[in-house]
Image (spheres, helix red, strand yellow):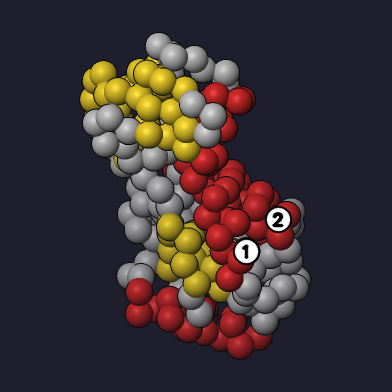
Amino acid sequence: MLFRICLPLESAPRVSGEEFEYLVKVLRLQAGDLFESVQERHIGIYQIENIEKKSLTAKLQKEYTENNEPAQKLQLVLPLLKNDKMAYVLQKATEIGVYKFWLYEAENSPVRFAEPKLERWQKIIVSAMCQSRRNHLPEIEKIELSELAGKFPNIYYAHPAAEKKWPDFADNTALVIGPESGFAPAELNYLAVNALAFSLGGRILRAETAAVAMTARILF
Ligand code: SAH
């Protein structure tokens, strides 16, 4: 299996920046060595021609297509969590196969939105996608809970106080996870009307554990 970077490459490309550092400083590839680059389902196998100080040139050897995506598109709707927890969910759920992340500021979220964080999170998703050999790059987008009903035909929310059951998740379901201290009353009112509740029972998981565990169970 060849090492892979996530850059759309033309036929005689130059690689610089972080991808260059990764191939040359971390993996220690040399002229003549091969690597892959992925763009959705199209994979190119490249041979390194020339390594310079800050960039390298490579030549396309072969192209092929592959599909490692799960059968279902899962839309994961997450409350803003503290930074390290957010990073954890985004990395793990990308590896497992979430199609797209939607982030909302829950009333009980301990943090608020800041643009620079969104950029950092995007990087985490790109490297998790590449490392896990997925073909689709999950997007990350802000949303208000109140917009959910207009966007998704099937919405479920995980709520410990609901009836214990495991729903039959249809393709493109939006799965809403609550913040660490739970949904606020106004949020619960909205969800009760526009979405279906389910519970996993009496063991209360942390929000990040719930997100990752449920994603895995739905997609495997
Ligand atoms: N004290 C809070 C617990 C929140 S746990 C409350 O009672 O609501 C954080 C989030 O993880 C929850 O909002 C829910 O979305 C999810 N979660 C954790 N454990 C769960 C369980 N057993 N069943 C369903 N959802 C759960």
- Residue 117 - label: 1
**For the residue marked with disc 2, what is the amino acid?**
Lys
Instruction: State the image coordinates of residue 50 (x, y, percent, origin top left).
Output: 41, 20
Identify the secondary structure beneath mark 2: helix
Residue 58 appears in the rendering: yes
Comparing 24 with 39, the one in front is 24
Q: Earlier in the sequence, mark 2 or mark 1?
A: 2
User: 105 above or below 44?
Assistant: below
The residue lying at 71 percent from left, 77 percent from top is: 108
Check contact, mark 2 vs mark 1: CB within 8 A.
Answer: no
The residue lying at 52 percent from left, 41 percent from top is: 17
Instruction: State the image coordinates of residue 11 (x, y, percent, origin top left).
Output: 24, 31
User: 209 above or below 95?
Assistant: below
Residue under pointer 2: 85
**For the residue marked with disc 1, what is the amino acid?**
Lys
Instruction: State the image coordinates of residue 81 (x, y, percent, origin top left).
Output: 68, 65
